[in-house]
Image (spheres, helix red, strand yellow):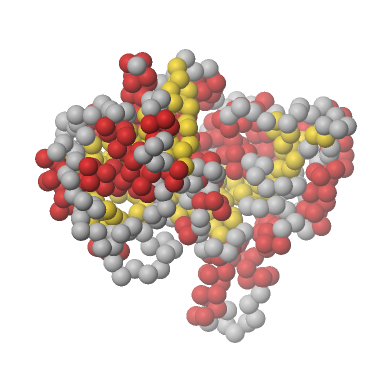
Amino acid sequence: MSLRKYIFVTGGVTSSLGKGIISASLAKLLQARGYSVTIQKLDPYINVDPGTLNPYEHGECYVTEDGAETDLDLGHYERFLNMATTQNNNVTTGRIYQSVINKERKGDYLGKTVQVIPHITDEIKRRIKILGSKGNFDFIITEIGGTVGDIESLPYIEAIRQLKWEMGPLNSLVIHLTLVPYLSASAELKTKPTQHSVKLLLENGIQPNILVLRTEHPLNNDIRKKVALFCNVDFGSVIESVDVSTIYEVPLLMQKENLDVSVLQKMNLPVENKPEMKPWKQFVNKVKNPRHHVKIALVGKYVELPDSYKSIMESFVHAGAVNNCKVELRSLQSEKLNESNIGDLLSDMHGILVAPGFGDRGIEGKILAARFARENNIPFLGICLGLQCAIIEFARNVLKLEDAHSTEMYLKTPHPVIDLMEEQKGVTSKGGTMRLGIYPCNIKPGTRCSRIYDREEVLERHRHRYEINNEYLDRFAEKGFIASGINPDTGLVEIMEIPEHRWFVGVQFHPEYRSTVLSPHPLFINFVSEALKFRNSD
């Protein structure tokens, strides 16, 4: 019988304090104690999902196995918990209002005036409870996006207030994450922002049960006592979250601070057994104390915002730990790559990854990077559009197909080596209409990827509209660029590789979405391993 306990995580003072990491860390500790845990993100923006958002606006769009385009925090949840999330794990204001308006149009409210309270808040509560009913979970952690005091967050705060009252103190609690800034002029840590943030919560009818204080400097007992006194929490519920060198240290820090113990005590649950964190500690030790070092170029057009490629970056952390290696990523803006500077920028790299994306901005720089890797025998990994760029480059420079391109970039190309998927023709709506979610891929025996995966069929996540044009596959194969992975149901190409190259692999799917701390993705592991061999051969 599931316990069904609900934990709500809110944030105050400023955004980007790390509510997702704190939520994932607490979930990890509870999971390590033997509890079944899932996490949900409620986002206050009106977009139905982040699929149509520019990565500069909101970071990467994460894709779940069931094809939901979601907030990047779900990537953290999966990487920490080593379990898949679903469309129910991410809900936006846009989706809430869309659902309510659809019901109103159908007459479900029987002519009543539809209002924020109770109709919007009821829909929020329903979405929170749906997640709990979909699995046999002991704990459902719900992270509220944004900052307390934001106008757009008010319906979520009100929904939490109602749920806390409905569920009772032993079945629900609120963790509030705030900032304790350090003023260098007076050499002091200041608690006033935290006090005001909690006051805002209280004005909305919510007393936080636990406070997690982000800080650049350790908190002394006097500061903790002061926060506890003025914010109506007990001393043991004031948790320090000091800055660390890697996000993967946070669960260990939260364990040291007894965050999980405080949660269990407040919910009248036993705390005798300790969480089994040995594998996690071993991983963190490898991340912090690598024996080797490689440099890999990340070529993309959103590199100014690291969150745009968050899952790729974290996949390299996972793969680096397996190889006892620190992966130094050099992010290169593809728009700035050209014939005159590409040698200077890439010649000292031990591997090159061309990142996914959409649109023609920076496309020629990505194509140049693929060519440089191929011609200089540098380990290369192309993901989604990165694979397509490698195909275009090969068609132009090896097959001698002049003006070969993708119809996404050049509709009238005489050689559409990349073309719109058949089922995408006629699609005009942008949101949630791509090939999304998990699909099977059959791997050709004897290929590099068959050795990497060590299995004949794999499941990988997708997010694309365009595909490799199968009419050109024979010509590619004749020149040594072979299709080593095929979707068994549609015949779509999933993986291409050059057997004669040191390591040259392109994938139509997104392997970064399936890499976790305890299950690093084999493609990234092998890519880093080969980059290390390449470095040592210099």
Question: In the image, residue 495 lies at what x, y percent?
Answer: 25, 42
Which residue does the image show at 61% across and 31% down from the upper left?
250
Which residue does the image show at 55% across and 21% down from the upper left?
288
Residue 460 in view: no
Q: Quadrant of the C terminus?
A: top left
Residue 103 in view: yes
Question: In the image, residue 95 lies at what x, y percent?
Answer: 53, 64
* Apparent side of residue 434 relative to residue 163 in the rendered image (left or right): left
Question: In the image, residue 64 lies at what x, y percent?
Answer: 43, 49
Question: In the image, residue 141 lies at what x, y percent?
Answer: 59, 46
* Apparent side of residue 62 relative to residue 262 in the rendered image (left or right): left
Please tell me which residue lies in front, 270 or 243.
Answer: 243
Which residue does the image show at 45% across and 43% down from the upper left?
336
Which residue does the image show at 60% across and 60% down from the upper left?
45
Is 31 situated above or below 131?
Answer: above
* Apparent side of residue 79 relative to residue 176 in the rendered image (left or right): left
